Image (spheres, helix red, strand yellow):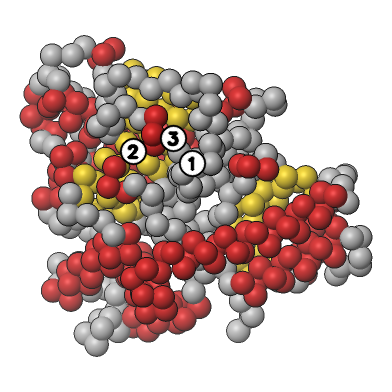
Amino acid sequence: MTPRVLNFGAGPSALPESVLKQAGEGLLDFQDTGIGIAEISHRSNEFKTYLQGVESDIKKLLKVPDSHAILFTQGGGSAQFSAVVLNMLARHHELYPALEPQQRVMDYIITGSWSDKAAKEARRLGGGTVNVVVDSRKLSTQEKFDNIPSHKNDTYKFSRNPVLIYYCANETVDGVEFSREEGNGTSFPFHLLPEHAPLVADYSSSFMSHPIPRLQDHAIIYAGVQKNLGPAGLTVLIVRKDCIVDVDKATQNGALPVPLCTAYQTLAKHHSLYNTPPVLSIYITGLVLRKMIQDFGEDALEKYAALSANKSAKVYDALKKGEQNSVFKSKVRDDSGSQMNVVFDVVGEDKLNQFIAGAEALNMKGLLGHRSVGGVRVSLYNAVTEDQVQTLVDYMTKFSEGKSVP
Ligand code: PMP
């Protein structure tokens, strides 16, 4: 077999090799049933029990309180751009039936292209109005998503009784751990939120790479699994139970209709089995979760957070040396760097191509930046090992010293 590459891709991304081998066996025989996981009925007791196990492992690892339900759906993070709006508008109608659409304000914190897309979808759907709480491009000298808005100077303009307050946890260019630490002035401004704020977070890029700060204070958290957990197809939702509302009743009262499979009510009522779920993606996600718990116990997310801090620190160090040699240039400000995705340019004509070609010669793949942003993007998801990072860092160091690389 061709040796496996060192995969620094942004998603779908690296998965643990041992899990992939196990999954291969499960494709032929799921838990000694004699049927493969892609063939077995999603209504079989074996699969239903498996799904409950996945839910319970997520609950354990993220310490999800009983106030919140864990739901599984499809359509990726992008489908949630619409679903969160429709479900939360329905809730707002339930709470405040008499308001006009212009009084139903959805607050968006725009710190990168994903939250920007989400805000555009809210505007497209209508039924309420969008208030941009802050747009980090306006705080950039180059009108770019290269910074996390600081808590100073009244930067965040929240509205008084919003339908939702939306943010993307891992953004700016495409990746700052906006939500990661509190109190450093560039993290999520929890302390500025209006009371009882219905907080909605897109955790697609960093889900299960660290504990979620203030999870219990969120109305909705959602994430596609294709970064740290499994193959694309499954979206995990953590929804505070009061946000699972009777959408049809809300529609009778003037709210936008909510497509059945988009309504959290449908997912909750049918234990995420209203229609056929993405069984293979659920299966592999379950294997990865088991491995996380087996390797590091129920506090595994603390361990992954430490690992990812370590891995990214090494890459940032190599980036800094490259900057001193005028070979690399970071795409984000010093205090806005992501631990999941390190993004930088390679200075000089054709140097990016040289850098990528040299990396590929060493079997490192997935390093080319997002098509809209360019440059290099190093994604450091959970399955990327410290040894693999060391190989990359050695290569970056040699490249920036102008030493001969393959
Ligand atoms: N939000 C974020 C933060 C993402 O990183 C992505 C995709 N990588 C998406 C949303 C879109 O997710 P999907 O492709 O699953 O629709």
Q: Is residue 238 above or below residue 243?
A: below
Where does the image place residue 42, in percent across and percent down from the top left? 20, 67
Q: Amino acid at mark 3?
A: Pro
Give the left or right position of residue 217, taking residue 91 as reference. right
Some atom of ligand 1 lies within 8 Å of the CB belonging to the residue at label 2: no
Q: Quadrant of residue 251?
A: top left
Q: Alpha-carbon distance for marks 1 and 3?
A: 8 Å
SS under mark 1:
loop
Q: Is residue 246 above or below residue 181?
A: above
Residue carrying label 1: 183
Quadrant where the C terminus is found in the figure: bottom right
Q: Between residue 269 and residue 212, name the one nearer to us.
A: 212
SS under mark 3:
loop
Q: Is residue 226 visible?
A: no
Residue carrying label 3: 189
Number of residues whose C-alpha sits closer than 10 Å to that of mark 2, classed few (under 14), some (14–19) or many (20 or more): many
Number of the front mark, 1 or 2? 1
Q: Amino acid at mark 2?
A: Val
Give the left or right position of residue 308, taking residue 257 as reference. right
* Rendered residue at 29%/24% (across/down): 162
Q: Between residue 160 and residue 395, name the one nearer to us.
A: 160
* Rendered residue at 13%/74% (across/down): 45
Q: Does the residue at mark 2 contact the one at mark 3 (Cβ under 8 Å)?
A: no
Q: Alpha-carbon distance for marks 1 and 2?
A: 20 Å
Q: Amino acid at mark 1?
A: Gly
Number of the front mark, 2 or 3? 3
Query: Which label was assigned to residue 200?
Result: 2
Where does the image place residue 84, in percent across and percent down from the top left? 29, 36
SS under mark 2:
strand
* Mark 1 or 3, nearer chain start: 1
Q: Is residue 391 visible?
A: yes
* Rendered residue at 17%/69% (across/down): 48
